[in-house]
Image (cartoon, grey):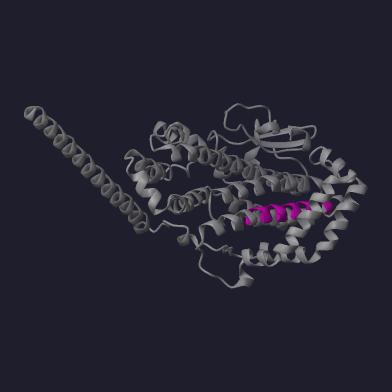
Amino acid sequence: MAFIEARRTTRIWIILALAGVVVLLLVGWILYSAGSFAGRIAAIRAAGDPASLAELAPKPIPPDENAAAILASVAGRIDSFGKDHGRFYKSPIGKDYDQRMDGEPLTAEQAAAIKSILNKYQDLHAAVAKATACPRYASTLDFSNWSQFQTAHLDALQNIRTVARFLRWQSEIAMSEGRTSDAVENGIEQLRLAKLFESEPLLVSWQVTCALRGTAAPNLYDSLTSGKISESLHDELDAELVRQDDMHGLVRALIEERAYSITALDEQLGRAGRLVINTIGWRVKSMHNGVIDWYDQVLPVIGKPWYELQADPVARGVFKTPTGFGVLTDLLVPAVQAAYESANRTTAIMRSLRIYNALRNYADKNGRDPSGLADLGLPASATVDPFTGKPLILKHTDDGWIVYSVGRDGQDDGGSLKDQKDCGVGPPKAR
């Protein structure tokens, strides 16, 4: 019996010793992971990049020079217009308007109904014009409170979409009244609004800027088609389109998204939650260091055009899932990949619109259409299809010119802009 009791005691001590080793290993892993994560954050800051939501707060600028502050001051009017805009679409005239072909001229009834709404918002028109003329945009959101920031950020996204709808209606009314120059100037305002809103942080804001550019492009195409404008206005539009051709905005948005992700993880998990999760070894990497590791891989390549990234197997691999960096990273990849595709598609559309603007200017000055891209005098870099690295395609049809990229599939669908088979600008039937 004594022998059995001794064996039992020995077994207990062995189990306790093994448990102690496991605890020491877990503690060591926790300390290592915490130190590693802290080291990664320090390295991000040392590189001059933000590592928290609070660090995304812009430096204050005078309200009269800040487009964000001007738009925030009329947020109530923007919301009021948005409600009127929504009610219009529920009316019989609004339903007919919604069902018409894109680019089809307004009927007299539709134009009168839209104009009656716009006339109620002359003050909003003045504020939007003042905002789009501003040189800078510094977000007015509170970056010190994560949960409040989320709600306010969604409101800012909705407001900017509403302002874009306001400008689009103004363009349509100007075209319906034969005021081609006013329609083009409104389109330029839409582009300026998009460029300014790039300074609103995070990836979703970048996606909204792409959408703003995407809706401005067909309006500007139709405006340019509807009549002649001065050479100086052609030049003004060209200069604005040069500013829009910039992939660096996506890189900046991802740097901001990384900072937001760090704060989001801290806020969602909390210190107690992190301690529990840290005891499950591999999850430390997947939820913290893994996310940052993936950003380290994607940031150097995300600013490259599509054709360059696709030609590099290593770069192309950043969008593969599972990533090997944890489940949160796997969930993030589709959104970043969609933003990257949007960036290239928007670049193609902006370059196509620039070519069409140059084409219209050439025809007005020479009394004939150009024979090809070479006649337009644009830099070669401005005519490159970001999806292929080859020149964008210029095609004349009975309905008008189509300027387009073959899109992500690399297949030329003859300039069919429906369902994004190709992407660019063209007459309503092509859209």
**158 drawn magenta:** yes
> Residue 368, image x and y in percent?
76, 41
Residue drawn at 40 percent across, 49 percent down: 273
Q: Tell how many labels.
A: 0
Residue drawn at 50 percent across, 34 percent down: 307
Residue drawn at 92 percent across, 48 percent down: 109
Q: Which residues are magenta?
A: 156-173
**133 drawn magenta:** no
Give the camera-side residue of 302 and 414. Answer: 302
In the image, farthest residue toward the front? 1
Q: Quadrant of the N terminus?
A: top left
Residue 35 falls left or right of residue 174: left
Residue drawn at 81 percent across, 65 percent down: 122
Q: Quadrant of the C terminus?
A: top right
* Figure check: 70 above or below 398: below
Give the camera-side residue of 27 and 367. Answer: 27
* Figure check: 184 above or below 13: below
Using the rendered view, name the quadrant where residue 119 is placed: bottom right
Is residue 237 visible in the rendered structure shown here? Answer: no
> Residue 410, image x and y in percent?
57, 28
Residue 405 falls left or right of residue 255: right
Give the camera-side residue of 16 and 213. Answer: 16
> Residue 369, image x and y in percent?
74, 40
Which secondary structure type mostly characterizes the magenta part of the structure?
helix
